[in-house]
Image (cartoon, rainbow, N blue to C red):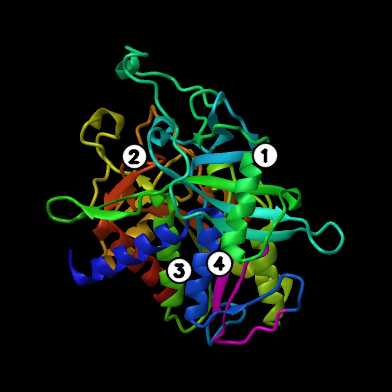
């Protein structure tokens, strides 16, 4: 692995390590932006923007928007936008989590998104997210962000002796088979999970919290294993949450290193993509159009200028693509599959669950060729329905040239996914030239 690829892989492994929940992905992203000189904006304040300025805002804790106003930014200059998502499939803790059986300390959990359920079994799981505590005034809670940073739970399989048909394929009942165990107790406390949260907040913040002060929480279980380079040539990367932290990190890098002279560059990191994006934090809401309109207003441009800029803009939805699994080649399109290490996948679908058209795909292919970045058009099999993306959602709300791209991935939505380290470098370079190059 050469030094440039190694640098990209290290950055990706670091954000995977820090980004154990959507809240923590946003915090890790903000940390990078601050170090690069980006200034924070508050939603409920007037924005004063300057040419050459770099800004970010996070109005809903798990959504982040950041942008660069280049030196020449006015009517007629192009808007370029990259969208990706911070959430990943997995398990989330329910309210009233205590769900003991005999002396087993269990917690009630639900499946979030389209997880490959069996990959979450027999694996040490950590816990991270947000806890809402009683505030000091009115009904506004005090928010505590929590990452316990150690294995806490296990979801145990039945043994083969109890289910002889297991290796023939067994459907898991999420309310029965995917209940996490946190340990054993001689005497079961009624509120053992809430008391545990209070202890963890004390460790994290250094101040005591009563269990009665915990009003609610949004907590994810996550694969405790960190990303690692593997393979006989050290060319593979296996890690949790590659979908879609590959694109989050590449988007951040591209924006921070963008060198375009004119126009406006924006990245949008959304939550809830894995469950349909229909929320205030998701790409199907009005957050992005509202933010864009406010940016144009703060720069002294009219609504007409904004609408014309949208029509002339260019959107890339950066998300992962399916790589050919050599054990099941029959599941992939016979002529337009992609393998690991072949660069950036330009995701195509005539039914528009991926955004794009022939002209846009040609432009993206030409962009890669012009900068010697490998990229290929790829389709899924015609008899396998693919999922929809931020690209198809956003291009309907913001009518501009749009496309879906990403790194090829094995075992998408598993608790542990696999990719080529080189593809992360290619994606970073591709998004960088997209933001830094000439007019599209």
**What residue is shown at x 32% (from left), y 12% (from top)?**
164
Alpha-carbon distance for marks 1 and 3?
A: 41 Å
Residue under pointer 1: 191
At x 40% / y 32%, what residue is drawn? 121
Query: Disc number at residue 312?
Result: 4
User: Mark 3 — residue?
Assistant: 252
Q: Position of residue 231 (x, y in %)?
A: 17, 50
Residue 61 falls inside the magenta stretch? yes
Q: Quadrant of residue 427?
A: bottom left
| 3D distance between C-alphas at marks 3 and 2 | 25 Å
Q: Secondary structure beneath disc 3?
A: helix
Q: Answer few, some or many: residues within 10 Å of disc 1's Cα (few below 14, many 20 plus, some between 14 and 19).
A: few
Camera-nearest residue between 266 and 55: 55
**Residue segment shown in magenta:** 47-69
Of residue 254 and residue 217, the one placed in the foreground of this image is 217
Q: Position of residue 359 (x, y in %)?
A: 41, 55
- As drawn, the label of residue 411 is 2
The image shows residue 308, relative to residue 401, as above or below, that is below
Q: Earlier in the sequence, mark 1 or mark 3?
A: 1
């Amino acid at each position: 692995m050469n030094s440039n690829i190694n640098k990209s892989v290290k950055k990706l492994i670091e954000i995977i390590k820090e980004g154990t929940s959507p809240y923590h992905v946003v915090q890790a992203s903000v940390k990078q932006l601050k170090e690069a000189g980006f200034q924070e904006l508050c939603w409920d304040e007037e924005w004063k923007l300057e040419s050459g300025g770099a800004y970010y805002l996070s109005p809903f804790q798990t959504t982040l928007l950041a942008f660069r106003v280049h030196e020449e930014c006015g009517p007629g200059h192009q808007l370029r936008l990259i969208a990706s998502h911070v959430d990943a499939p997995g398990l989330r803790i329910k309210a009233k989590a205590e769900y003991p059986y005999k002396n087993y300390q269990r917690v009630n959990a639900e499946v979030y998104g389209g997880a490959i359920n069996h990959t979450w079994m027999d694996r040490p799981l950590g816990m991270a997210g947000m806890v809402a505590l009683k505030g000091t005034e009115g009904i506004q809670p005090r928010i505590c962000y929590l990452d316990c940073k150690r294995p806490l739970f296990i979801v145990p399989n039945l043994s083969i002796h109890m289910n002889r048909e297991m290796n023939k394929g067994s459907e898991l009942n999420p309310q029965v088979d995917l209940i996490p165990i946190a340990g054993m107790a001689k005497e079961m406390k009624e509120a053992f999970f809430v008391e545990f949260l209070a202890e963890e907040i004390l460790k994290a913040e250094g101040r005591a919290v009563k269990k009665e002060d915990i009003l609610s929480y949004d907590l994810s279980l996550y694969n405790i294993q960190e990303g690692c380079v593997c393979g006989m040539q050290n060319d593979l990367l296996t890690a949790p949450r590659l979908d879609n932290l590959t694109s989050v990190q590449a988007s951040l890098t591209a924006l921070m290193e963008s060198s375009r002279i004119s126009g406006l560059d924006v990245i949008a990191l959304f939550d809830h993509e894995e469950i349909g994006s229909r929320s205030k934090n998701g790409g199907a809401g009005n957050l992005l159009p509202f933010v864009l309109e406010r940016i144009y207003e703060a720069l002294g441009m009219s609504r007409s200028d904004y609408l014309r800029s949208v029509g002339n803009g260019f959107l890339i939805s950066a998300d992962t693509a399916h790589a050919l699994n050599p054990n099941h080649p029959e599941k992939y399109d016979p002529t337009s599959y992609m393998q690991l290490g072949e660069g950036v996948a330009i995701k195509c679908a005539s039914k528009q669950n991926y955004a794009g058209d022939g002209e846009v795909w040609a432009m993206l292919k030409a962009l890669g060729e012009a900068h010697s970045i490998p990229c290929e058009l790829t389709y899924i099999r015609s008899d396998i329905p693919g999922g929809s993306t931020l690209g198809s959602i956003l291009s309907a709300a913001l009518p501009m040239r749009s496309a879906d791209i990403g790194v090829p991935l094995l075992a998408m939505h598993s608790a542990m996914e696999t990719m080529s380290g080189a593809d992360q470098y290619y994606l970073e370079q591709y998004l960088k030239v997209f933001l830094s190059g000439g007019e599209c």
